[in-house]
Image (cartoon, rainbow, N blue to C red):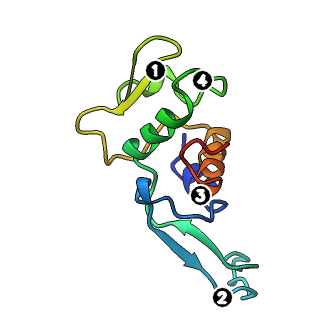
Amino acid sequence: MKKWLIMFALVTAASTVQALDIEWVTVGDAGNKPDKTGYGAVAYEFQISKHEVTVEQYAEFLNALAVKSDPHALWHASMSATVNRTGKPGEYQYEASKGQEWRSVIYISFLTAMRFANWLHNGAGQGDT
């Protein structure tokens, strides 16, 4: 899935979660006009992640919400090269594959990206998606 989905989803997340060490930047100048292409206008001030979500950060999300069960399919078998899932149903554990920790997470759907953003917005940890 395209990396921009994660970035788009993070636009909606307003709180900084220290455990994930996400660096936020403010996009301001609310009310500015679009450029000659019609793009670039900012209707309101918001924050967005400065960097893409890493495999390590996503594994933390999975460990918070997909250990006992994964009804929203937050982890997919296609992720197995970057995010290891071990254990049996009800006792899953997730970790970034060695050497993959700082890579951008991949194989994320738009809805899963939105769940990640909602989780951040709701305080992470056991926060809701």
Mark 4: which amino acid? Asp
User: Residue 12 falls in which quadrant of the image?
Assistant: bottom right
Question: Mark 4 and 1 residues: CB-CB less than 8 Å, in contact?
Answer: yes
Mark 1: which amino acid? Tyr
* x and y percentages locating residue 116 in the rendered image: 59, 46
Residue at 45% over, 55% down: 52
User: Residue 11 falls in which quadrant of the image?
Assistant: bottom right
Q: Residue furthest left?
A: 99
Q: Which residue is mark 1?
A: 92
Residue at 53% over, 16% down: 90
Vertical comparison of 96 with 122: above or below: above
Mark 2: which amino acid? Asp
Q: Which residue is mark 4?
A: 70
Q: Can you tell which of label 1 and label 2 is closer to the viewer?
A: 1
Q: Which residue is mark 2?
A: 29
Q: Is residue 56 left or right of residue 124?
A: left
Mark 3 element type? helix
Mark 2 element type? loop
Vertical comparison of 129 with 31: above or below: above
Label 1 or label 2, whichever comes before in sequence order: 2
Q: Which residue is mark 3?
A: 10
Q: What separation in Å lies between label 4 and label 1 (alpha carbons)?
A: 9 Å
Mark 4 element type? loop
